[in-house]
Amino acid sequence: MGGVHVDNFKYYPGYNTVMPRVKTETDHQSKASRSGNAFQREIYKMILDQVKDPNLSVNQPSTTIVKAGKKKRKGKQFPCLLIHTPIASFIGDTDIVVFNKRKQVPAVIISCKTSIRERIAQALYSARLYRAQHGENLPFYLVTRDPGLEFGSEQKPKKALVMVWHERISVYTMNPRTVTGGPIRPIDQLIPDIHLVTG
């Protein structure tokens, strides 16, 4: 017999019993998704409010997957962000993109992560694919509020720090506990760095 969810409890009609609602993996994923989307919107607004160059546009591309031989879904498309494979074309790890409007190419690609544990490889792979298409000097940034404890320090770097350093990816942290240095930078350096590479 079905029940009605109210807050964290499930009520069964006709019964006085109130069963606690057991949180599932789907609940956890949904909460993480909402948190990630809110964080992305926060960073997007910050960049949009401070990057005013008329030659640039700040966008949030959708992660569209286009099957081979099928029409694209409606909506704003960014052909220069599509990564083509024999199976399908897709947009990689690109939460926010600062575009050069005159050249119609990405000037900076930014990936927002509430947590970067086990996600660095995804960002590094996307960075390699986009640099293969748009040049090895394409800036690729990670923005996070993760404590970043797995990075270590410049003196004692951990694997994740070595990876982003080697791949020339800058990581901007909103967490004051994160040890900065090398490619790990405080969040207040993000806008100046965007201005620097797009100026």
Image: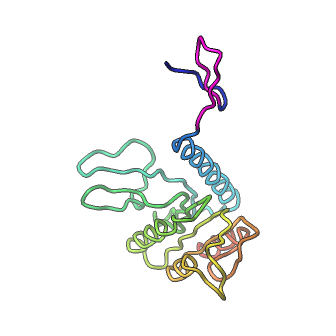
Residue depicted at 64% across the width and 49% down the height: 38
Which residue is farthest right?
176
Quarter location, residue 174: bottom right
Which residue is farthest top?
14
Question: Residue 32: x percent and y percent?
Answer: 59, 49
Classify the position of the C terminus by image quarter. Answer: bottom right
Residue depicted at 55% across the width and 62% down the height: 111
- Vertical placement of residue 29 versus 9, above or below: below
- Vertical placement of residue 42 versus 117, above or below: above
Task: Pick the residue in front: 77 or 128.
Answer: 128
Residue depicted at 65% across the width and 85% down the height: 154
Magenta part of the protein: which range? 9-22
The answer to if 25 sits in the magenta stretch is no
Task: Pick the residue in front: 156 or 163.
Answer: 156
Is 76 displayed left or right of 177 in the figure? left
Is 170 displayed left or right of 125 in the figure? right
Question: Residue 5: x percent and y percent?
Answer: 60, 26
Is 49 displayed left or right of 103 in the figure? right
The answer to if 20 sits in the magenta stretch is yes
